[in-house]
Amino acid sequence: MSRAYKFKNPKGLYFATFTVVRWLHVLNSTTRVKIIVDSLNYSVREKGMEIIAWVIMINHVHVIFRSVGDYLPQNLLGSIKRHTSRRIVENLLENENNIYRDIMLNSFIEEGKKSSNVKTYQLWQHHNKPIELWSKSVINRYINYIHFNPVKAGLVERPEDYEYSSAIDYAGGKGMVILSHNWLSHDSHD
């Protein structure tokens, strides 16, 4: 991993991405999306994660966050990735029985064999490519990037119409993930 992509400031605000290995379409199920949503919310409630913006796409997740508790930002993401990986693989094993499931699981096994720290299945790519966000204009640019991801993918016409995103919160509604009220009430994000 490049030095440009490291969590250098433990209290910094970061844009990070976690991507399914081989860009497989694993997050195409409401149940699997809920696993990620629940893990993000748990990290907010129990581990001091402050989330500013997020989106869950079919094969990757973007999040803007910071640690306001005792956990380092890389440990927060590592915990989320470990937990969601285990739960998503369990979901595939228990609830799917088709050729695509077998392709996904075999891909996870093959990727896991390449890594010394993975026992069987590797769902997520190892890197998160964290980028520290340092100014309001940069933060706003990344929030817009996240919120327009589903529009760019042709899933919706307006960001706030995509339910697996914080765009709903920024449009005055209530999304699935607990966001930082400090940021949402800030008049400088518009």
Image (spheres, helix red, strand yellow):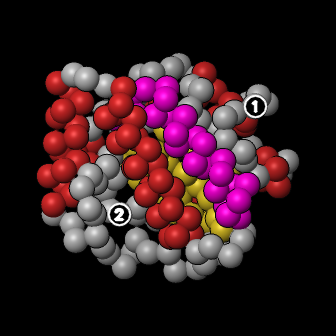
User: Disc 1 vs disc 2: Cβ atoms closer than 8 Å?
Assistant: no
Q: Nearer the viewer, residue 131 or 72?
A: 72
Residue type at tag 1? Lys
Q: Position of residue 160 (x, y in %)?
A: 64, 27
Quarter of the image with the N terminus in it: bottom left
Residue 24 appears in view = yes
Question: Looking at the image, is 67 positioned above or below residue 107?
Answer: below
Classified by dominant secondary structure, the portion drawn in magenta counts as helix
Is residue 19 covered in magenta?
no
Relative vertical location of residue 10 with respect to residue 26 in this rendering, above or below: below
Helix, strand or loop at disc 1?
loop
Count of number-bearing discs: 2
Q: Which residue is mark 1?
A: 174
39 magenta-colored: yes
Where is residue 10 drawn, in percent x and y? 60, 78
Is 101 left or right of 15, judged from the image as shown? left
Segment tinted magenta in the rendering: 26-50
Instruction: Say left or right for 48 vs 106.
Output: right
CA gap, disc 1 to disc 2?
30 Å
Q: Which mark is residue 2?
A: none
